Amino acid sequence: MPSLLAKRLPWTKAPLIINAPMANSATAPLALAVKRAGGLGQIGSTNDLAALETELQTLSTSSQLTRTSDGLLPIGVGFLAFLANLDRAAEIVRKHRPAVVWLFAANELGDYAAWAERARQASPASMVWVQVGNVASAVRVAREARPDVLCVQGADAGGHGLARSAGLVALLPEVRSALEREGLGDVMLVGAGGMADGRGAAAGLALGAEGVVMGTRFLGARETKLHPVWREAVLAAKDGGQETVKTMVFDELRGESVWPEGYDGRGIVNESSEDFRTGAGMEHVRKQFTEASQQADGGYGVGGKGRAAMWAGTGVGLVTKEQSAAEIVEEVREGIIKALEEARARS
Ligand SMILES: Cc1cc2nc3c(=O)[nH]c(=O)nc-3n(C[C@H](O)[C@H](O)[C@H](O)COP(=O)(O)O)c2cc1C
């Protein structure tokens, strides 16, 4: 039976697969391909909202994308709330009316209420989704911002998240229970963090998620914009707890981190993270990075010898080949059904 959420995204097929709105990497081609495969395709953004506008313009004028009966563009748009200008973001939402406005990493949890309100004023039919990483913030954001959906992000996630975080297996059910206890059970949940194939995604659904958000798996998608060395590193990496690391180092390479307090990021172990782990001071790590980034390869290096950040989650070991985004969506969707049937047969 399709989830309640899938019904609000009428072009999607169940189980619902969603690509994470990865800033600089999830652009129009990925969102379009995921949408066409029956998932929720999303675009990420930074503080450069002009770049986002360009991507949205491409999609708005694409003959391959028709608006929903509510007049919405059938994709999601991610905003980093600590970084993006709210007035400008609201203007973009008003102009393009994406089906989903995804918010993450506000400076203060209280900021989400203003963002949600502005998004709703700008495009009343759009849904507001907020990505959160612990139980207390899920409850507070649900109460104050009244999002349609909370994306519960576990510690295995690639890219940024709370430094103090739990894996999705414990986190998502505790969030669900807490919301119900607080009378906020109408907020729908999707999960993120560590789900990279049908088995992990099936587990996410079993935990109570109405959809599966994947970032790392889509780093293997041809439509995702990625430096070739980064993609090779993702395809080569195994044993994600060993070959990725959750750290502040990658955010400090260019100077003080600009992320809100409490956030760090998970990326592939490289010379920057190894030097820091083995005792080199941040000044030294930064200097080495600055020199490396002036090389032709931009500091990515080869064979894990680079110094530039390559964000990826612990699911990297399950991303072994480059594929089209459509293949990924279909493979994971079929994999979920197979995994659930097999689990049923064993239970
Ligand atoms: C390369 C990369 C970039 C990301 N950028 C963003 C971003 O700009 N905004 C955001 O809300 N989340 C971002 N995330 C986090 C995702 O929203 C999501 O939580 C994560 O990818 C899920 O875990 P997974 O990587 O194990 O699939 C990023 C993740 C990755 C891997």
Image (spheres, rainbow, N blue to C red):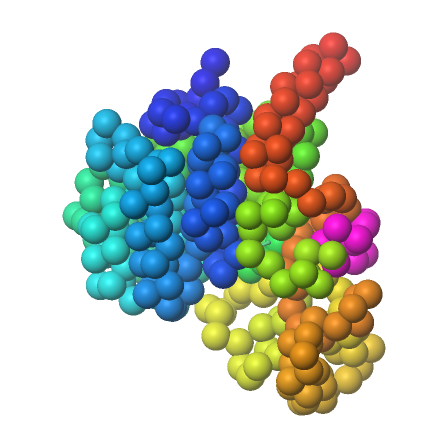
Residue 172 magenta: no
* Residue stretch rendered in magenta on the structure: 233-246
Left or right for 324, reference 6: right
The image quarter containing residue 274 is bottom right
Q: Can the viewer see residue 301?
A: yes
Q: Is residue 14 above or below residue 130?
A: above
Seen at 67% across and 25% down, the residue is: 335
Seen at 25% across and 44% down, the residue is: 97
Residue in the foreground of this view, choosing between 151 and 295: 295
Q: Can the viewer see residue 154?
A: no
* The furthest residue to the left: 121
Tally the marks.
0
Spot occupied by residue 261 in the image (x, y as percentages of width and height):
49, 69
Left or right for 10, reference 323: left
Left or right for 47, reference 273: left
Spot occupied by residue 268 in the image (x, y as percentages of width and height):
72, 61
Seen at 69% across and 29% down, the residue is: 199
Residue 234 magenta: yes
Residue in the foreground of this view, choosing between 242 and 68: 68
* The furthest residue to the front: 63
Spot occupied by residue 324 in the image (x, y as percentages of width and height):
61, 39
Seen at 82% across and 65% down, the residue is: 303
The image quarter containing residue 92 is bottom left
Residue in the foreground of this view, choosing between 196 and 205: 196
Quarter the C terminus occupies: top right
Spot occupied by residue 12 in the image (x, y as percentages of width and height):
43, 27
